[in-house]
Image (spheres, rainbow, N blue to C red):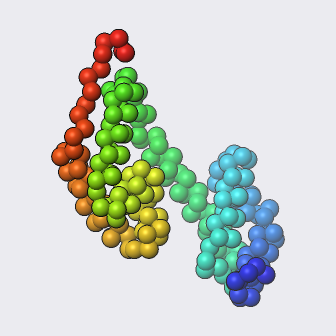
Amino acid sequence: MGFGESPEIVDLRDVVEQCLKDSWGRLYGYALSLCGDRDAARDLLQGCAVKALDHAAQPREAGAARAWLFGIMRNAWIDGLRREAVRRQDPPAEPIGPAPWSYEDARIAEITVRQGLERIDPAHREVVELVDLAGFRYAEAADILGVPVGTVMSRLSRARLALLEAIERGNVTSLERSRTSR
């Protein structure tokens, strides 16, 4: 038993693990009938096992666990079909021509933003750094900051406005590129 796990959680996981072992062949056969391809069936079975073992509310009885596993597999297969249908509907993105910004423009923009960040309130700077520059999602940033997601969203909105104002009233101006640098 792992640290912090209650005996009941381990027992429930044992029921699901044993049911997976006992039903592995039948689950694979069902996956194969759904997918029609051995590799896809193996992937589906593996995904089903992972979802079942990670699920918080697991069945307590072997009979219920077996039906539950087949349900997980069916739902995973349907989800895969839906994802594939969406992929087929969306045309592939057409490549955009050459980048509209040159390296110098991008570097100047980065310097401008960094200078603007230095001029805003530290709480605003922190949320912009986490979400816009480090790429954290709102929920992740909320966990890091120890605040609700709504607070992160409102702070980020105010922080972006403050950053734009700092840049607008700043003294950074775009440099002209010489023709020789092209």
Residue 47 position (above or below residue 182): below
Which quadrant holds residue 57? bottom right
Residue at 35% over, 46% down: 114
Which of the pair 83/135 is nearer the observer?
Answer: 135
Does residue 78 appear left or right of residue 14 in this picture?
Answer: left
Q: Which residue lies furthest to the front in this view?
A: 171
Residue 137 can be seen, yes or no: yes
User: Is 117 or 35 nearer to us in this picture?
Assistant: 117
Number of marks in the rendered image = 0
Position above or below: 25 against 39:
below
Residue lying at 47% horizontally and 43% vertically, measured from the top left: 87
Task: Quadrant for residue 17, please give it.
Answer: bottom right
Q: Estimate the x, y position of residue 118 in percent, counting from the top left.
A: 33, 52
Quadrant assignment for the C terminus: top left
Which quadrant is home to the N terminus? bottom right
Vertical side of 72 occupied by 36: above or below: above
Q: Residue at x 33, y 70 (%)?
A: 151
Coordinates of residue 43 in the picture (x, y in percent): 69, 52
Q: In the rendered image, is residue 160 in sight?
A: no
Viewer-nearest residue: 128 or 30: 128
Residue at 23% x, 34% y: name it: 173
| Quarter of the view holding residue 30 | bottom right
